[in-house]
Amino acid sequence: MSAPARTRSPEETAVTTTVTTTVPEAPAAVPALGTGGTAPLVRRRGAGVTRWAAPLAVFAALIGLWYAITYLVLEPSKRFLMPPPQDVLAAFGDGPTMERIGEALAQTVKVTFTGLAIAIVIGMAWAVLMSQAKVAERSLFPYAVALQCIPILALVPLIAFWFGYGFPARVIVCVLISLFPIVSNTLFGLQSVDRGMHELFDLHGASRTTRLLKLQLPAAMPAIFAGFRISAGLSVVGAIVGDVFFKQGQAGLGIVLDNFRNRIQGAELFATILVAAALGFAVFALFGWLGRLAVGRWYDQSVDAS
Amino acid sequence: MSAPAPSVPAAGTGARVLHFRDVAKAFPDGTVALEGVDLDVHRGEFVTVVGPSGCGKSTLLRIASGLSPATSGTAEMDAARIGYVFQDATLLPWRSVLKNVQLLAELHGMSKTATDQAARDALELVGLKGHEKKLPRALSGGMRMRASLARSLTLDPDLFLFDEPFGALDEITRERLNDELIRLFQAKGFGALFITHSVSEAVYLSTKVLVMSGRPGHVVDTFEVPFGADRTPELRFTPEFAALSGQVSHALRAGHS
């Protein structure tokens, strides 16, 4: 029972895409849902005003920067590259544009969640299998790492070659891109169970299945949900990237983005980007909420703003 | 004030539940943890092993429970069911107190109604009635240990193994739990093998105290404890208690040097 050196804590997974980072903590600890394993359990909170004032100031500064680029940096003829915020807001008020974006959003959501669901099933089964025997782990983990190391974009032409340009190909991109965090977090969680608890189950003759269902899986839930949350965000990326590449079939956000770009509709392009960002944030928040629902009762965590 | 009854409880009044003859344990790195350990526990006997840290006391329990095999010698356990109380309460944090106490009965395939009944009885025995729905994180260290005890009690074990269960608790909680344990022992009549580094805890709880020294760990002295079943906290302040504690302490120091 040791924290495998090749497993990453969820926070690191979220921030970087390297594979060699090691888990910086003792095996008994389970990674926190929202923070790295080494973060203190209690977060210090600022007093009322500073708590909101600083974030608002940063937000205002960014909007100011946006205006500055639009009106001070860009010549009027090039302003389509970065239309001012009010033009982008106006795009949100335009019925046909929003209808188009809305349909694309629905399609992207469908691809995202189908891919994510498949990745969850495959990823958890993969991790459970590896947790059952060292030899299984040694045989199967390298492929999880390979999956993470091969740039998925490099596989996209092959996926198109094999599966065409439609819905299945897009889903496959989502699965490939979101599989690794689920595999690694689930495996880490399953292997982080306290030794004393394992001995309790040893003493009372628990079978493999019983141990898995009553001890390892419940104990791994915080890590598993941290993996889901990361993968959900990646799955959105996969759905949009798949769209941009395949360009056929029912249009998702990726195709709409590409069309607006082609037609030099800057404001609409920005509006679509904001919708895509909102989708990414929404799935991240959804899984944060599901995680709290599942383990928040017993698992000490300091989940961030999501 | 109840004066300690001088009657020696008949050692081995019940069936033998644990039998060690010449047990030795060596680890792969060459460390010899135990050597030539002889020891018997019968039902109705409370045997305590007292010794310094690192003398192999815990290894003794691991061998007794079958968690770890002896390197040589005979280690036989003749108990259908054992209770093992670890240093840590090892409660599952996602289960309520009641669900935690039901765990072992579940693992042993007891029926739902029997499991539920056993758990509720055990919780009442350890004084945790009314805390069924709480999560372990909401309990104090002493209450967690009570829940851990209750969990083992559901199996009605013939042999109870205790690995310094109260070592992490404050003295008041520890003494209270000692009294509870004596009461449980009287009520259930199991055989107990209790590990501690506290001389007074050993003398207070036991019918027999074994003094170990290390390394390699072996039993250097055995003391029959003459106090009867009706032990109360006042016993700790009697001359007889002090005298016996002094002897055990002396043996411990002699073995240690």
Image: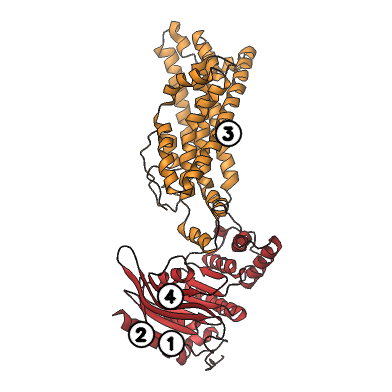
Chain colours: A orange, B red
Marks 1, 2 in one chain: yes
Q: Which residue is mark 2?
A: B251
User: Which element type, helix, strand or loop, lies under badge 1?
Assistant: strand
Q: Earlier in the sequence, mark 2 or mark 4?
A: 4
Q: Does the CB distance between marks 1 and 2 fall below 8 Å?
A: yes
Marks 2, 3 in one chain: no
Q: Which residue is mark 4?
A: B74
Few, some or many residues within 10 Å of mark 3 (<14, 14–19, 20+): some
The three-letter amino acid code for the residue at tag 4 is Thr
Mark 1–mark 2 Cα distance, whole angstroms, equals 10 Å
In the rendering, which numbered label is found on residue A117? 3
Mark 2–mark 4 Cα distance, whole angstroms, equals 26 Å
Few, some or many residues within 10 Å of mark 4 (<14, 14–19, 20+): some
| Chain letter of disc 1 in the image | B
User: Which element type, helix, strand or loop, lies under badge 3?
Assistant: helix
Of all residues, the one furthest to the right in this rendering is: B113
In the rendering, which numbered label is found on residue B223? 1
The three-letter amino acid code for the residue at tag 3 is Ala
Of all residues, the one furthest to the bottom in this rendering is: B6
Number of numbered tags placed on the structure image: 4
